[in-house]
Image (tube, grey):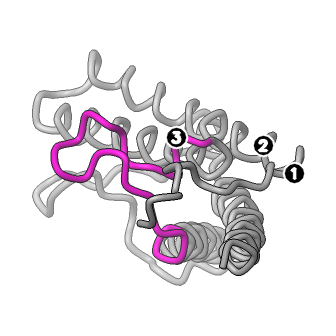
Amino acid sequence: MSPHDTGRVATVAPRPWAVWAAYAVPLCVLPSALWRLSLVFTDDAVTRWYMLLLSALSMGLALLTLGLVHRWGQRVPHWVPRLGGRRIPARPVVRAAVTGGWLLVAVCVYFLLNQRFHLVQSGWVGIGGDEPAHPPPGWEVFRFYAPLLAWGPLVVAVATDYRRRAAMARGTTVRAAARHW
């Protein structure tokens, strides 16, 4: 850091569609998370921890997408020991978001192909090998999971916009440093 550095990050405003897409991600995840949480009160004790963990993890990851369009996603919070206030490097953030988005797309494509072509013949099994086989869930369950089909493409789109903005901000910072000298 130079003595002239104010500690502010050069930012470029996200495109409006990217902001809408980032806010759509948690809304896509919310129905399935709420449905799983409703099972906590009706299901046996063995799967309760799993349903709670999966709901919390999926909502947490979905909410992290908002950091791609807000300033708080560019710096470590000041209350974090030793790291507080440091800039978060854009390249690993973009790599993680794009990789996660494409993994979500791959899981959805596999699921849809398996439903159509029956690539895996066994019936749906809950958790663990000793769980009895259940019939495949119908629309009464899939309606809560259908919005998840948009999760992956939305994350990839928002991460692509974040990468564009980070590159523009980096170019602005480099030009400003060159003018300073």
Q: Nearer the viewer, residue 129 or 25?
A: 25
Which residue shows up at 80% across the image and 49% down it? 13
Q: Residues within 10 Å of mark 2 (few under 14, many from 20)?
A: some
Segment colored magenta = 71-93
Residue 15's disc number:
1
Horizontal arrangement in the rendering, residue 34 relative to residue 20 (left or right): left
List the residue tagged with mark 3.
72
Question: In the rendered structure, which disc, 1 or 3, sits on the residue that comes first in sequence?
Answer: 1
Image spot of residue 164 (x, y percent): 77, 71
| Label 2: which secondary element | helix
Q: Nearer the viewer, residue 169 or 141?
A: 169
Q: Nearer the viewer, residue 175 or 23?
A: 175
Amino acid carrying mark 3 in the image: Trp
Quarter of the picture holding the C terminus:
bottom right
Do the CB atoms of the residues marked 2 and 1 lie less than 8 Å apart? yes
Horizontal arrangement in the rendering, residue 181 relative to residue 45 (left or right): right
